[in-house]
Amino acid sequence: MPNTAKQVLELGGSDPFVVLADADVEAAAVTAVTAVKARHGNVGQSCVNAKRFIVEEAVADAFVPAFTAAAAKQKVGDPTDPETTIGPMACANLRDTLHDQVRRIVDAGAHLLLGGEIPDGPGCYYPPTVLDHARPGTAAFDEETFGPVAAITRVADADEAIAPANRTEYGLGAALGTSDLDRARRLTRLLDAGAVFVNGMVASDPRLPFGGIKRSGYGRELGEEGIREFVNTKTVWIGPAV
């Protein structure tokens, strides 16, 4: 009988980046810059990029313009130019799918604050795009937006943030921005994700187990748990000598 190989699947994601209101305007701006970096790595074409930003209402009016301004500073252009931060997408069909998602999210009531148009010229470029007031039940939540598009959803308070954060079939990573670490410990237990990073962007680190739940896959890679995924446990029981 042939051996059955063990496997780990790390699939897509629609990672939430939750921003709580226990930060002043300056801190919200700093968080926004981190959030922009979390969204735009590899032109937003990563399963573990932050894609949905769940922002507490009390800080939203500080966070959203700061995020939009930081996104607008991204330089779209030749990927061989060291100054470029947003190169072309991998292929035309990915860009077309992303643009269709943006149009549908706007048609569902979101406010387009930045980008949202395919530029003229060669190359599969798409500009950094910011959508405010994105709603659950739209492509921002139900699909993976694989490109430089950020969807922002405003919530009344920290507890209300959990439901929209979890309102997705994916569960790879999640980020949580807050200065209240006791509350952070409580909320991390409620977020449906294989990894939750507090006050930082989700990243793959060889020292830490990495993987998702729901449609984001199963099993873990990296870290001790990643090694054990591909090791068979052998039980040996020894009775008394006779």
Image (cartoon, grey):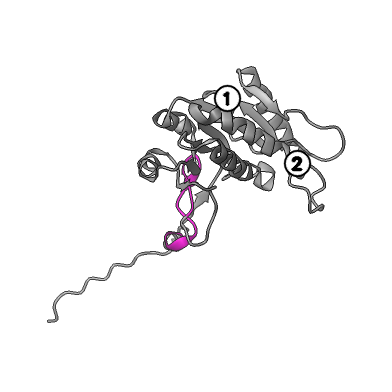
Q: Nearer the viewer, residue 207 or 197?
A: 197
Considering the numbered disc 2 on the image, is that residue within a helix, a strand or a loop? loop
- The label nearer to you, 1 versus 2, is 1
Considering the numbered disc 1 on the image, is that residue within a helix, a strand or a loop? loop
Marking on residue 91: 2
Q: CA distance from mark 1 to mark 2?
A: 26 Å
Q: Quarter of the image holding residue 128?
A: top right
Marking on residue 240: none
Q: Nearer the viewer, residue 141 or 37?
A: 37
Residue 92 visible to an observer of this rendering? yes
Residue drawn at (42%, 39%) of the image? 192
Residue 142 visible to an observer of this rendering? no
Q: Which segment did they paint magenta? A: 210-227
Image x and y of residue 82, in percent: 79, 54
> Residue lying farthest right?
121
Q: Earlier in the sequence, mark 1 or mark 2?
A: 2
- Quarter of the image with the N terminus is bottom left
- Magenta-colored stretch includes residue 188: no
- Magenta-colored stretch includes residue 214: yes
Residue drawn at (52%, 23%) of the image? 137
> Residue lying farthest bottom?
242
Image x and y of residue 23, in percent: 49, 38
Residue drawn at (52%, 24%) of the image? 136
Image x and y of residue 7, in percent: 48, 54
Image x and y of residue 35, in percent: 59, 41
Q: Which residue has dot 1 on it? A: 134
Q: Are marks 1 and 2 in contact (CB under 8 Å)?
A: no
73 left or right of 193 in image: right
Residue drawn at (49%, 34%) of the image? 169
Label 1 Cα crowd, 10 Å radius (few <14 / some 14-19 / many 20+): many
**Residue type at tag 2:** Cys
111 vs 176: above or below: above
